[in-house]
Amino acid sequence: MSTITTVLGTDRARRLRAALIVLLAAAAAVGAPFYFAPFQVFQLTMVLLYAVALAGLNLLVGFGGQISLGHGAFFAAGAYTTAVMLDRYDIGHLATLPVAAAGCFLLGLGFGVPALRLRGLYLALVTLSFAVFLPPLLKRLEPVTGGSMGLTVDKLQPPAWSGLAEDQWMYFVVLAVTAVALLLARNLLRSRVGRALLAVRDNESAAEVMGVRLSLHKTLAFAWSAMFAGVAGCLYTWVIGFVSPDSFSFVLSITLLAGLVVGGLGSLYGPLLGAAFVMYVPSVSQDVSEAAPGVVFGLLIITVMLVAPTGLAGLPGRVLGAVARRLPRPTAPDRTPETGPAPDAERKSPSDSAPDAERKSPSDSAPDEERKSLSDSAPDAEPKSQAECEPSAILTPADPAVVDAEPVGAPPRTEKE
């Protein structure tokens, strides 16, 4: 009972701690646009929309066990879908979000079917080819996409009743969409589909034996991942107000994958940390070295991987584990003779020992004494005679045969005797 109480108490404390962290993070996120400058608010908005894209990539790579180097292509598809709808058809901004999500979901579903028979490096090359040929294709479709010049659209404007600036309103809209996307990813991973993805990632053969349809769940992983990337692309068009083929090169796909690995694969908080890395580290690299920012960016990635191999999300656990290993372990207190056997002696009452004493009669202990052979006592003394062993026979010589009998071990009698 005490063990169950302890476990329940620990679980309750863990939930309270998680709820407190979420409340503090929500309070900081809500108050951030009123504290920072407009450019810093813009950077925070970009971090949030990159987190949505990395959450989808985490479903495919971190939890699905597959690899993709073409995630930037789905990102571009969502961005261009939104831009074309805003520029050509004059549709409201909020109406473009579900259309971009549904279109990228179908695109990922169609791309996942031929990728079923591929894995590892072969799958990575196929997805990379998708990211490489999409920008030239967008340049060729000039009547629709604007060609190399791209498309310029209006940004999402704040309503009059909000009283917020444009950057603040955009930040709150993207924050709401990001919160819903991360909550959807969390619930998806805790559902039957998420457990099937984990089973496929750990062992495909065992998952298939347990009844998991590998083709279905692998295809769905691509579809869900592409949908999240399309939502992020839609938010990108809202925030930037401009799209061009050069903004979605294959470098974007590699950067997103590097950000996910740095943030932490298979972690719910890894996409947020990876998005911050993708947004701020290039800016820091540009400030450190204007001639070679890529060198600084690569060195920072190598440093993070050496310090935290499991990503930034697993760094606190590694630090706490290292501190716990260095702390001295508590030793058990030594027991004194007075405190050691006292409880056992008190528990044993006379009523417990009485039956044992009554059960043990002299007839029970006699065989134990008779088992001692003369060979055990031979080195110490000579064998005793029968008269010495049984003095009662000398004191009461009622039987003449016993008196006239020769002692055991005596020499034979002669005729003279």
Image (cartoon, rainbow, N blue to C red):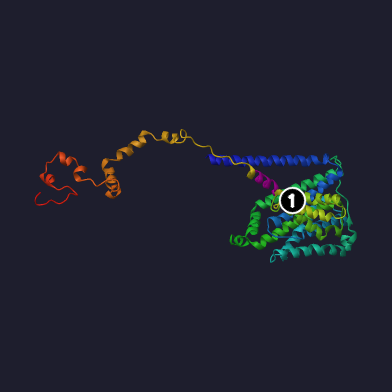
Relative depth, front residue between 5 and 110? 5
Q: Residue furthest front?
A: 416
Q: Magenta span covers which residues?
A: 314-323
Q: Which residue is mark 1?
A: 271
Q: Residues within 10 Å of mark 1 (few under 14, many from 20)?
A: many
Q: Residue furthest right?
A: 149
Q: Is residue 296 left or right of residue 10?
A: right
The quarter of the displayed image where residue 71 is located = bottom right
**Is residue 49 shown in magenta?**
no
Asked if residue 334 is positioned above or below residue 179 in the image, the reply reads above
**Is residue 321 shown in magenta?**
yes
Asked if residue 45 is positioned above or below residue 110 in the image, the reply reads above
Picture coordinates of residue 23, whole percent (x, y): 72, 40
Picture coordinates of residue 209, whole percent (x, y): 59, 62
Relative depth, front residue between 156 and 346? 346
Q: Is residue 328 left or right of residue 402?
A: right
Callout 1: SS: helix
Q: Is residue 209 visible to us here?
A: yes
What amino acid is found at the position of numbered circle 1 in the picture? Pro
Q: Is residue 36 left or right of residue 269?
A: right
- Chief secondary structure of the magenta portion: helix
Q: Residue furthest left?
A: 416
Relative depth, front residue between 323 and 179? 323
Picture coordinates of residue 374, whole percent (x, y): 27, 49
Picture coordinates of residue 205, whole percent (x, y): 61, 62
